[in-house]
Image (spheres, grey):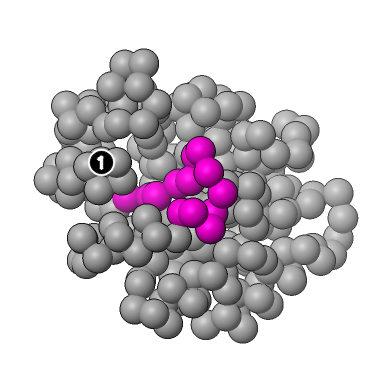
Amino acid sequence: QAEKNAKPALESGCKGIFLINHDFDYPQFLPIIRHVRQRFPDLWIGVNFLAVTGKIAFPILADLQNDGVRTDAYWADDARMDERVEVQETANEIARIRAESGWDGIYLGGVAFKKQRPVPEEHYALSARISVPYLDVVCTSGIATGQEADLTKIQTFRDAIGEAPMALASGITPENAADYCGLVDCFLVATGINYPGDFYNIDPARLDALLAVTRKQGEIA
């Protein structure tokens, strides 16, 4: 299934894919990562272990790297930012583990992210701002999978982080992508480009339609 869905992404000229373990624990996921990398040695591949922070993920990714299995990015649902405290102890620990692991990919971390600890709207800017030193890409979302994000939230994040890279990870479709293109650098999308009623399989026509929007934005920029 992972290989089947990687093919339309590659054929469409998509810049990269993420592999995610939606229905099973991450140990069962590792052979899939190895297989997809073997089948697509040059493809940009990121991974997301659901409900797993970088504390656990980075040493695993380093082991894969040492075995010749490159992962280009890790996306954590929760970067463990806490706007309620001054010292980010957990984020600091994750940063230390990442550095010690030797894994050299890109770190995308969820901030005020779906299905995590709720962050009050008035704290969005602070949450975004404190995350910048810890993350290569600040990643946020709407309230749930497939739910588009409030544009006000995304604008608040952009204003707070300045030129730092930013990703949006829910609710993007070919129909609404243009609304967000000027605010974020990266879309993480599945539901919005899948076949109707199918949570698992990419519709190449939907993917092509989304890429047409992003490419047009690039021409404007």
Q: Which residue is mark 1?
A: 5
Residue at 18% x, 46% y is 7
Q: Is residue 60 above or below residue 144?
A: below
Residue visible at 63% across and 39% down in the picture:
113
Q: Secondary structure at mark 1?
A: helix
Q: Which residues are magenta?
A: 17-29
Q: Amino acid at mark 1?
A: Asn
- The answer to whether residue 96 is above or below residue 150 is below
State whether residue 61 is above or below residue 170: below
Quadrant for the N terminus, please.
Answer: top left
Which residue is painted at 24% across and 65% down in the image? 38
Residue 172 in view, yes or no: yes
Q: Is residue 40 left or right of residue 86?
A: left
- Give the farthest residue toward the right: 85
User: Residue 200, percent across and down?
Assistant: 36, 31
On the image, the x and y values in percent for residue 173 come to 34, 25
41 lies left or right of 25: left
Tell me where residue 177 appears, x and y as whole percent.
34, 29
- The answer to whether residue 213 is seen in the rendering is no
Q: Is residue 153 magenta?
A: no
